[in-house]
Amino acid sequence: MSTENVSQLRRFSKDFGLTLRDFVGSFRSLRWRLTLSYSLVTIAALLVVQLIVVGLMMSYFVQNLDLTPENLIGNLREEWTPMMQEFFSQEPPDIDGMRAYLEDVQGSEIGTRPLLIFGKVHLEMKAQDFLNFYYLLNDRTLVDVIPYGIVPESELGKQIPYNYLPGLSAPLRAALSGVEDQKQLYEMVEPGNRITGAIPVFRYEPTKLETQPEVGQRTVMDVERNLVGVIVFTTKHFPWEFLPLREVMVYIIRSLLIFTLFAGLLGSFFGMLTANGLTNRLTLVSQAAHDWSRGNFSVAVRDPNDDELGKLSNDLNIMAEQLETLVDRRQELSALEERNRLARDLHDSVKQHAFAASAQLGAARAHYDNNPEKAFDHLLEAETLVGKVRQELSDLIQELRPVELKGKGLVTAVREYAEVWSCRNHIRIETHIKGGRSIQMEAEKSIFRILQEALANVLWHARADQVDLFLIYKSDSMILIIQDNGIGFDPNHTIQAGMGLRFMQERAEIIGGELIIDSRPGHGTKIMLIYPYKMMAV
């Protein structure tokens, strides 16, 4: 295979893999999940309904089976005793013939009528599934059993006691006494409400009765009843195994294959319609939330429905309006804070130096005629003060310039600003940056402003010659630390620096961070900002 063919095969495999991944990924969307849930719910509901119907029908059939003891004895006497009578009535009883006959018929049905369950599925109850039979001669000799194996082979041909089976004593005595009352021929046995019964088998022989000769010679026939054997039976637990579960399950599975197909298609169709409308409405909410995250609060969710999602959309619109108002107020407050800070800085530095320069110029003018040398010294001092005014105005203008963090990131901006600040103010600064990640633009701007304010306080109030700057990115938060070796202060009683500290505190609260100030007179100052990710407030 040529190199070109191999390259084409690889491109095809890659494209096919991407297509397959996109196809599989599309089924993870909310629309397909809702469609699948509708289909599964429809199929599950159909299955539950079918199982309930099957259970109710089987329960109905079981409750309506005519399995009362009297009826059972009547059916057995009608269907089973005639052949037993033939075998037992012979001299001696034809045991071998009886066993051969029972071996042929032990799988036959007893005399209950077939019950329709589903279509052509009938309820069939066979003797060996429902009953145990014990065939006795009139002297209680056990000659055969159905089904085979319920007694040891060695017990055949032996006399059994009256209590051979639970509940057998009274019915067996009644049967051996020739009783035909069905109520005396069975006993209910606990547990399980099983039945133990005994059915007598008679041989009927005609006899002759002669009348008086004077009346006329006439012969009258009568029938003599002789007990020749007993059929003992016991029922098992209720015969659930008689129900044609295999046939019923086949029927159910066949029905499910048909109904499930149509139910699944129908459920998928309605599920897709419902899911499509729901996901479209959620898409509108998502698009609006995306615009809000970018600061565009003019976008509103248009959902005229009055359901829960419609109410949620209305609440989000109200929230967006409130956020827009809050942002406007925050911006106004921020502008006011900047003006106040600028006024404070101008008052603390520029105004004082300008006033001092003005005083030096006045002194120079006063000594200009009488003492030119002293006037010249005052002019030099005024020039120095004007230079300081110019420098401080340049610093203020530099801080008031917009911070362009986009494209370079907070780490780069902090490092560059620290270098420029150190060179401009002749204060040594050590920058330590560990880690890095992208955070929200508004948070980066606030953090940068806090850094500017902290370094401005170091310059104007701390009298420090060393600053340590730490910017640490952790797994859950970012930490900014500005520590100097200056004169320190008492945060609870400082008036001059209090305004700048309050500005930093408010900026930290806006982005959901925490500002910690640790300072004591004579021990320097440490300012630490902890910003947890994804916690920025508006």
Image (cartoon, helix red, strand yellow):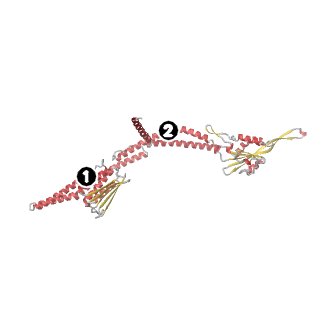
Residue 400: mark in rendering: 1
Quadrant including the N terminus:
top left
Q: Is residue 303 visible?
A: no
Q: Which residue is mark 2?
A: 266
Under mark 1, the amino acid is: Leu
Binning the other alpha carbons within 10 Å of mark 1 as few (below 14), some (14 to 19) or many (20 upward) gives: few
Percent coordinates x, y for residue 190 in the rendering: 68, 51
Kindly state the secondary structure of the residue where label 1 is placed: helix
Residue 471 appears left or right of 199? left
Residue 5: mark in rendering: none
Percent coordinates x, y for residue 287 in the rendering: 37, 44
Under mark 2, the amino acid is: Leu
Residue that extends furthest to the bottom in the rendered view of this protein: 522
Q: Is residue 459 visible?
A: yes
Q: Quadrant of residue 76?
A: top right
Q: Quadrant of residue 532?
A: bottom left
Binning the other alpha carbons within 10 Å of mark 2 as few (below 14), some (14 to 19) or many (20 upward) gives: some
Kindly report which numbered mark, 2 or 1, lies closer to the viewer in this rendering. 1
Residue 224 appears left or right of 150? right
Please tell me whether residue 21 is drawn above or below residue 188 in the rendered image.
above
Kindly state the secondary structure of the residue where label 2 is placed: helix
